[in-house]
Image (cartoon, rainbow, N blue to C red):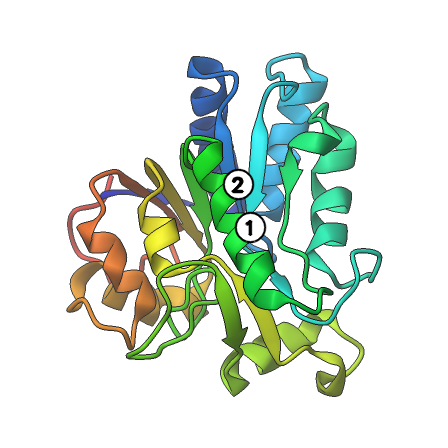
């Protein structure tokens, strides 16, 4: 693991954007695994600025998102389809046909999950997967669970995750209780992984991810077994780490 500690959220976002930019520069047809939530928004803003300044070209990039709420249409304001459109896709020159996000509004979930896995394989696999981390250690929507799934699957969200995500909805009752998510194996098959975390609330789980034992109770701890992981933190989320940081 390469651990980078920055001073604040903005610096974290800039550093993360440079990692993605380097990937695209070296391989213009990169397969990007993307994440939603508040953590990567700053990184997306930096990537948009790079595009507008003609430093980046997304025309041959292909994207796969980690997850989508189950039961929300693509047009729903809180869907991850909408999140990605508003926070990245409409601002850059990525081609619509190169954007892939699980469809959370289908009847045959099993087929949707199988098709998503097939598309990732047929694309040659994900070159770099962006991750956030939940306060309970989840990556994607892979919740703490001794039986967490390997491939893309339907997830029952924990109450902690529902409560954390309720800040994006008018009320907690509106938060979906299920989601489609890439599985642990799918994430771990990515050639590179870039994980971002910020804020004091993430300090404990960041420590457990990096320094703790590899346990299903902390899904992100599995990243210790990946051979190319970059973790970008702000000072608050890195507060409990003593060494192995730059």
For label 2, count other residues whose C-alpha is less than 10 Å away and answer few (under 14), some (14-19) or many (20+): few
Name the spot of residue 41 as percent of width and height, x first: 62, 47
Is 219 situated left or right of 101 in this image? Answer: left
The reply to whether residue 237 is visible in this rendering is no
Residues at marks 2 and 1, CA–CA distance in whole angstroms = 6 Å
Residue 119's tag is: 2
Compare residues 49 and 181 and report the one nearer the observer. Answer: 181
Q: Which residue is mark 1?
A: 115
- Considering depth in this image, is 124 or 237 the residue closer to the camera? 124
Taking the spot 61% from the left edge, 32% from the top edge, the residue there is 46
Residue 72, by quadrant, is bottom right
Total number of numbered discs in the rendering: 2
Q: Which mark is residue 68?
A: none
Res 143 seen here: yes
Looking at the rendered image, the quarter that the N terminus falls into is: top left
| Residue 183 placement, left or right of 21 | left
Image point 26% across, 54% down: which residue? 223
- Marks 1 and 2: in contact by CB < 8 Å? yes
Q: Residue at x 72, y 23 (%)?
A: 93
From the viewer's perspective, is 128 left or right of 92? left
Q: Residue at x 31, y 49 (%)?
A: 188
């Amino acid at each position: 693991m390469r651990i980078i500690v920055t001073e604040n959220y903005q610096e974290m976002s800039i550093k993360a954007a440079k990692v993605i930019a380097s990937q695209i520069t070296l391989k213009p047809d990169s397969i990007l695994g993307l994440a939603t939530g508040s953590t990567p928004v700053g990184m997306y803003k930096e990537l948009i600025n790079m595009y507008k300044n003609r430093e980046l070209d997304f025309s041959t990039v292909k994207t796969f998102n980690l997850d989508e709420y189950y039961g929300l249409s693509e047009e729903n304001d809180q869907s991850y389809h909408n999140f990605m459109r508003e926070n990245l896709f409409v601002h850059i020159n990525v081609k619509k046909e190169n954007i892939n996000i699980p469809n959370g509004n289908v009847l045959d979930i099993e087929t949707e999950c199988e098709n998503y896995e097939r598309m990732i394989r047929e694309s040659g696999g994900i070159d770099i997967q962006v991750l956030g981390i939940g306060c309970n250690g989840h990556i994607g929507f892979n919740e703490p669970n001794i039986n967490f799934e390997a491939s893309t699957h339907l997830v029952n969200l924990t109450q902690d995750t529902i409560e954390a995500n309720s800040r994006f909805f008018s009320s907690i009752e509106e938060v979906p209780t299920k989601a489609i998510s890439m599985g642990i194996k799918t994430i771990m098959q990515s050639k590179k992984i870039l994980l971002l975390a910020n804020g004091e609330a993430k300090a404990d789980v960041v420590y457990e991810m990096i320094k703790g034992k590899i346990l299903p109770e902390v899904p992100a701890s599995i990243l210790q077994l990946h051979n190319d992981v970059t973790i970008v933190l702000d000072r608050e989320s890195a507060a409990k780490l003593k060494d192995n940081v730059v």
